[in-house]
Image (cartoon, rainbow, N blue to C red):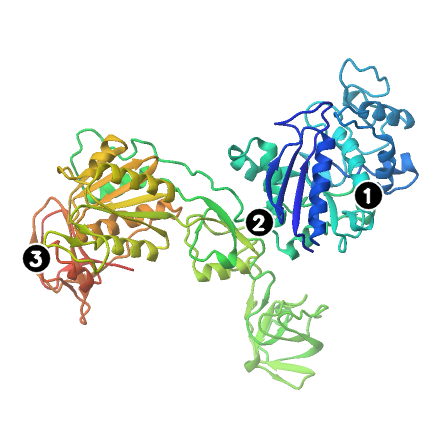
Amino acid sequence: MNFDSVIILDWSAAAKPTRGKDSIWIGQAGAGAAAPVNPATRAEAMALLRGRIAAARAKGLRVLVGADFPFGYPQGFAAALTGQDRALALWGWLMGQVQDAPDNANNRFDLAARINAQLPGVGPFWGRPSGLDLPDLPEKGSLRADMPFAERRVVEAQEPKAQPVWKLFTTGSVGSQALLGIAHLARLRADLGADCAVWPFEPSGAAGVVLAEVWPSLLAEQVAAAEGLYPCKDAAQVDLLAKALAGMAPGDLAGLMAPDAAAGVLAEEGWILGAGKADALRAGLAGDLPALTPPRLRNDCFAMPQGVDWVPVDEALARLRSVLVPLARTETLPVAQAGGRVLAADAVALRSNPPRANAAVDGYGFARHALTGEGPWTLPLVPGRAAAGQPFDGAVPAGQAIRILTGAILPQGVDTVVLEEDCATDAARVAFDGPVKPGINTRRAGEDVAEGQVALRKGRVLTPPDLALLSALGLAQVQVHAPLRVGVLSTGDEIIATPGDPALPHQIHDANRPMLLELIRRWGFDPVDLGHVADDPRKIAARLDKGARLADVMLTSGGASAGDEDHVSHLLRTRGSLSSWRIAMKPGRPLALALWRGVPVLGLPGNPVAALVCALIFGRPALALMAGADWPQPAAFTVPAAFAKRKKAGRREYLRARINTMGQAEVFASEGSGRISGLSWAEGLVELPDGAAEITPGSAVRFLPFGF
């Protein structure tokens, strides 16, 4: 089941031409996709709809038309008016009774009153303007009596927020929409002839045009999130619902069009496409949702308390963790495509693993309670066997056994399995020694994860084994954060941006930008190369503006201190919001934290060694949290030192280091922050504490591997 184009019609029963909120809107996705349009009258809307259908059919395209009003009434109503218990008989009857002028003037209240007069009791239709003199049409639903029909259709029990079809006036009066809408669609169906089918009343597999009842509120959360991007809620509804249906895989759409309801109900009452299956409908919208603006940080979030000067590393990390929030937008992905993404919501098991108790080995199964002694035991075998994917259809009587293979569901009467190698058999009997431990060689249902249990918490970066777990638990898709977009900008007149370009003695090639971009890529974020810009405030501001459009967070290197040429710092202070943190650490003392047009900026030192250390210690956990992940603790372990060093109290120090063949941490020969070769030589950092320390060979030190 597939359609080339999907058209969604948000209907209105207005009595005069109207546009905007609560009027008619038409959205289209797939072939012929177009922005939502807002015809002023039903006649204009139907002409537009017919034109779009004709254009699609001329190209041989299949079209699904969804309309947001009921296609049927509670059981018994069609037969009461037409003598036939089929909704399409009622469609034909209404086509001959409804009068709807080109200016939207219509006879819906008069028609409803005439219908009520033909039926026993008072009602079922109700609702009219107070000045309209129609005694057979109650003004309020509470005035009805002895109604011969149900208040709601069967499908509305699954979607209880849907309004009843008898209501003709005030907010949510879908009854008026249905009377007028059915008549218009009945004429369309008649004109299209055999090329048109109405779902679920007719087989629709071969029809070029299929009409179906829809309810945009099935996408209420997505519509609410995107409403500000459209002229009104109705425009958002038709556009997103059309995109959701157009984006569904053929098999998923076929499942949507196969409701679990009795044939009689479907033939007379109809059904809402997607009712009870909103998750599948929402899955079709993945990738088509407009980008959402995530929560932003407060302008003063990075400001240190008054009087704070030097900040210890642990205090700086704790403060950073407390002020940051996830910034990456969310989306729904198939599990198979979610590797490396961050869960945006808890993943809850839809089924147990294993789903049923099963055998852990090949062997013979029986009920342990029948065997209470030492044995040996000889049991007759029941005919047949149990295998994985081929369950035994029957029960195993007490005192008998069955051949069972690894992974097979335990048949009724089996709770224990004896290993094949511990048994003797002649195909009619099996013999084994006792005693036998109850439940041995079996797996309990849900012993790994039970249905309804949280399998993985939000904030987890999904690994390949996670995908196996989620798949085993019946999850087809998960809500994840989109990859965090991290912009990297280098500044400075002394920087040569392009590798290999000639450099004067006072110039240096850009080492930080390629290093930081690769770090970001390896950490699982989307690197955004913002290039290099000279020390020109206007150019720097323009490049920061570009970064704010393209990235969720920006990293800069250089120009973030307080010197005359530190234009990044000056710009962030005067036109953004800047807080310079002086961290009690070596290397990497200055760290600039700011917002530029609402986008966080982390200003790293210009020295490559200091830039890398600050990126590892502060950038990595901060970016992970903004990407929606849990705040990661650094992987670290204690090893003996292969060096000697004495340090004073007052700041934490990080030494470039690697592990030698003796399992000891050796450090780079020079602590000079300009020695980039030491970064390449090293495998990680040795972290020396804030206090005074004297390290001698063999002293225990903390080693933090780079973990690139």
Q: Quadrant of residue 594?
A: top left
**Quadrant location of residue 71?**
top right
Badge 3 amino acid: Lys
Q: Position of residue 639 (x, y in %)?
A: 19, 62
**617 relative to 536, above or below:** below
Q: Nearer the viewer, residue 83 or 625?
A: 83
Helix, strand or loop at mark 1: helix
**600, above or below 587, in the image:** above
Q: Residue furthest right?
A: 83
From mark 2 to mark 1, how far is it between C-alphas?
34 Å
Q: Which residue is mark 1?
A: 191
Callout 2 crowding tier (Cα within 10 Å): few <14, some 14–19, many ≥20: many
Q: For residue 645, which numbered disc appears in the image?
A: 3
Tell me the mark number nearer the camera, choosing from 3 and 1.
1
Tell me, yes or no, if residue 11 can be seen here. Answer: yes
Q: Residue 345: in sight, yes or no?
A: no
The 10 Å Cα crowd at callout 3, few under 14, some 14 to 19, many 20 or more, is few
Horizontal and vertical percent position of residue 47: 73, 37
Query: Which residue appears at 63% of the width and 43% of the height?
Result: 28
